[in-house]
Amino acid sequence: MTPAALLTSFRQSVFDENAPFLWSDDEFYEFATDAQEMFTRLTGGIADSTTASVTQLTATASTEYTAISPLILKIRLARRADFRSLEILNFEDAEGAGREDDYGSQWRGNRLDATEGPLAGMISGMEQDQVRWLPIPAVTETVMLTVDRLPLKSVTAGTKFEIHAHHHIHLLHWIKYRAYSKADAETFDKTRAGESKNRFNEYVDGLARIERNRRRHKYRTVQYRGL
């Protein structure tokens, strides 16, 4: 479903099909942007390994930190250009025991000093929207990420939703929550706003979350013996 088609469904469902409208097109697209973003936050984000602006980092030689996109909710995998995986740590993990990189070099989490060497890990949580390299890169390297992220763009009549198509119609629940929460005597309806918000949360906590967990389930090989 396109955002424009969802706008038509919205106007039909709230009996706002004739001008002057209670809610403008711009307001609808603002609500739709918020709905898609809220959906992705609550379901863990949109998987992405290919959007360069989000998934490609440059670890600059002799530089501790690199900025990451604020759209990233979780970094699931990080690889150097030679396809060696980096360990992904939060600050608390980095304060733990020492580790050994692929070259046999030792580094300790509690020694966040100026030591340089081949990239072995990245630490999140030390600075907002930045990662700290471990150790500090001796040479400039490209690092590719697999992430869960928020939508890239705001919803407009000319864009496409980034979440799966079968979820689109259910965004109407959050859109109606925002619409009925509008501070206007003709539109504000606390009861309908609450009902719409509850229906959205029920959908996300139920079918949408189950579906996401199923997609992320780790497949296991079954071995048959004695056949």
Image (cartoon, rainbow, N blue to C red):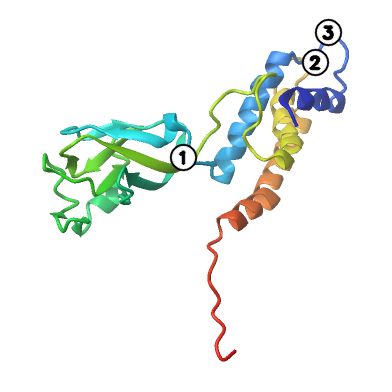
Specify whether 43 is left or right of 94.
Answer: right
Q: In this rendering, does residue 157 appear at all?
A: yes
**Discs 3/1, front:** 1
> How dense is the environment of label 1, judged by Cα within 10 Å: few (below 14), some, or many (20 and up)?
some
Amino acid type, residue under disc 2 in the picture: Glu
Specify whether 10 is left or right of 123.
Answer: right
Residue at the limit of the structure toward the bottom, as seen here: 226
Residue at 61 percent of width and 28 percent of height:
34
Q: Earlier in the sequence, mark 1 or mark 2?
A: 1
Instruction: Give the answer, above or below, for where 15 lies relative to 45.
Output: above
Specify whether 29 is left or right of 142.
Answer: right
Residue at 48 percent of width and 37 percent of height:
50
Instruction: Give the answer, above or below, for where 71 lies relative to 223.
Output: above
Q: In this rendering, does residue 182 appear at all?
A: no
Q: CA distance from mark 1 to mark 2?
A: 37 Å
Where is residue 215? Give x, y as percent: 60, 54
Q: Secondary structure at mark 2?
A: loop
Q: Secondary structure at mark 1?
A: strand
Q: CA distance from mark 3 to mark 1?
A: 40 Å
Residue 73 is labelled as 1
Q: Secondary structure at mark 3?
A: loop
Q: Which residue is mark 2?
A: 186
Residue at 20 percent of width and 58 percent of height:
99
